[in-house]
């Protein structure tokens, strides 16, 4: 199954990044890391982005017997995804 890349985050993009302040020089090397506000909000959100309306629509169609499965389309998309994975892994190795 191909992953749909049409997801748009609901939070506005962060324009200013928080920067790590250098540690006082005490003779030992120290590193500090900080996350942007967007990264922090993404990390704190527990739910993945889902289209609940679409899920409800599919559930209703299944319960009413209207949901039709197209095995040819499923097979075609599985083969396409497998090709994409093979191509991506061969590009990384090259």
Image: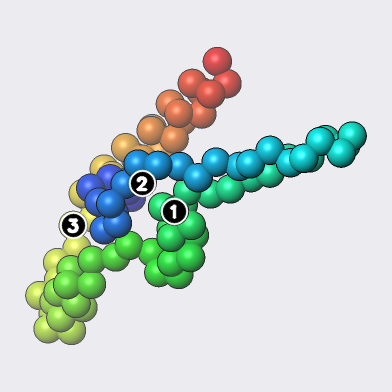
User: Which badge, 1 or 2, is on the more N-terminal residue?
Assistant: 2
The circle on residue 14 is 2
The circle on residue 64 is none
Q: Quadrant of the C terminus?
A: top right
- Cα separation between marks 1 and 2: 7 Å
Residue located 38% across and 64% down the image: 48
The image shows residue 24 at horizontal and vertical percentages of 77, 40
Residue 85 visible in the picture: yes
Residue located 19% across and 63% down the image: 69
Secondary structure type for disc 3: loop
Label 2 vs label 3, nearer the camera: 2
Q: Which residue is mark 3?
A: 70
Q: Which residue is at the front of the view, 56 or 20?
A: 20
User: Which badge, 1 or 3, is on the more N-terminal residue?
Assistant: 1
- Cα separation between marks 1 and 3: 43 Å
Where residue 26 sits, quadrant-wise, is top right
- Cα separation between marks 2 and 3: 42 Å
Side (left or right) of 21 relative to 40: right
Residue located 68% across and 38% down the image: 22
Secondary structure type for disc 1: helix
Q: Which residue is mark 1?
A: 37
Secondary structure type for disc 2: loop
Residue 55 visible in the picture: no
Farthest residue in the right direction?
27
């Amino acid at each position: 199954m191909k992953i749909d890349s049409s997801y748009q985050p609901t939070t506005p993009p962060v324009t200013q990044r928080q920067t790590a302040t250098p540690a006082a020089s005490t003779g030992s090397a120290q590193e500090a890391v900080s996350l942007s506000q967007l990264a922090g909000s993404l990390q704190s959100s527990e739910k993945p982005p889902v289209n609940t309306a679409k899920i409800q629509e599919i559930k209703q169609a299944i319960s009413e017997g209207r949901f039709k499965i197209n095995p040819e389309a499923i097979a075609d998309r599985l083969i396409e995804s497998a090709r994409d994975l093979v191509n991506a892994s061969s590009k990384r190795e090259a």
